[in-house]
Image: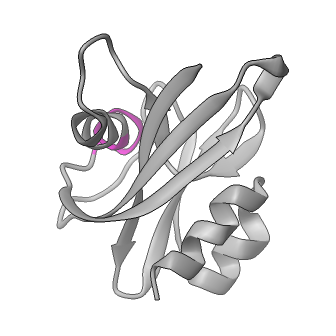
C-alpha cells in the first residue's frame, strides 16, 4: 500500500489548489511518506514542497482510499493554515486560491471534493 499525506490549506475562506502539469490535474497538495516519517510531518513537508508554504497543522479531516494502477493508496488529510505566500515549485506549475465552490468545480478528484465538506 502507498501511504501519502496532504493538506487542505485555508485562508480567508479560500482553499489552496495545485496544478500538476504531469497529470494535467487540479488537486490538493499531497505526497508520499518517506521511510519512518510520521503522517503529520509528511503532510506539512509535502505542502511546503509543492507550494512553498510553511503551515500550521490543524484538525485531521480523514482519509482517501483509491487504487491508481491497481495499487491501493491511502492519503490522510489535515486542515492547515499559513501566513506565507504560495508559489509554484518544481512539482507543480500553478497554485490557486479558490472559494469552496470554485474548488469543487476545479478539483479533478471526487475524494478531494468531499474533503471540502469536512471543513465546515
Seen from this angle, which residue lies furthest top? 35
Q: Which residues are magenta?
A: 47-52
Q: Residue at x 48, y 40 (%)?
A: 30
Query: Between 36 and 103, which is closer to the camera in this rendering?
Result: 36
Q: Can residue 18 be seen from the camera position used here?
A: no
Q: Residue at x 70, y 57 (%)?
A: 111
Q: Is residue 50 magenta?
A: yes
The picture places residue 105, in percent across and down from the top left corner, at 78, 73
Rendered view: 115 above or below 38: below
The picture places residue 2, in percent across and down from the top left corner, at 56, 21
Q: Is residue 33 magenta?
A: no
Rendered view: 104 above or below 23: below
Q: Quadrant of the N terminus?
A: top right
Report the side of 88 relative to 114 (left or right).
left
Report the side of 61 relative to 103 (left or right).
left
Query: Between 20 and 44, which is closer to the camera in this rendering?
Result: 44
Magenta: main secondary structure? helix
Q: Can residue 118 be seen from the camera position used here?
A: yes
Q: Residue at x 33, y 41 (%)?
A: 43
Quadrant in which residue 47 is drawn: top left
The picture places residue 49, in percent across and down from the top left corner, at 34, 32
The picture places residue 113, in percent across and down from the top left corner, at 68, 67
Amino acid at each position: 500500500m502507498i501511504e501519502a499525506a496532504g493538506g487542505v490549506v485555508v485562508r480567508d475562506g479560500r482553499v489552496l489548489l495545485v496544478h500538476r502539469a504531469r497529470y494535467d490535474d487540479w488537486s490538493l497538495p499531497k505526497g508520499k511518506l518517506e521511510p519512518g516519517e510520521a503522517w503529520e510531518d509528511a503532510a506539512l513537508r509535502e505542502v511546503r514542497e509543492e507550494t512553498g508554504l510553511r503551515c500550521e497543522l490543524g484538525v485531521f479531516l480523514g482519509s482517501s482510499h483509491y487504487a491508481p494502477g491497481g495499487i491501493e493508496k491511502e492519503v490522510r488529510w489535515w486542515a492547515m493554515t499559513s501566513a506565507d505566500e504560495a508559489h509554484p515549485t518544481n512539482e507543480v506549475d500553478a497554485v490557486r486560491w479558490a472559494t469552496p465552490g470554485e474548488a469543487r468545480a476545479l478539483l479533478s478528484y471526487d475524494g478531494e471534493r468531499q474533503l471540502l465538506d469536512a471543513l465546515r
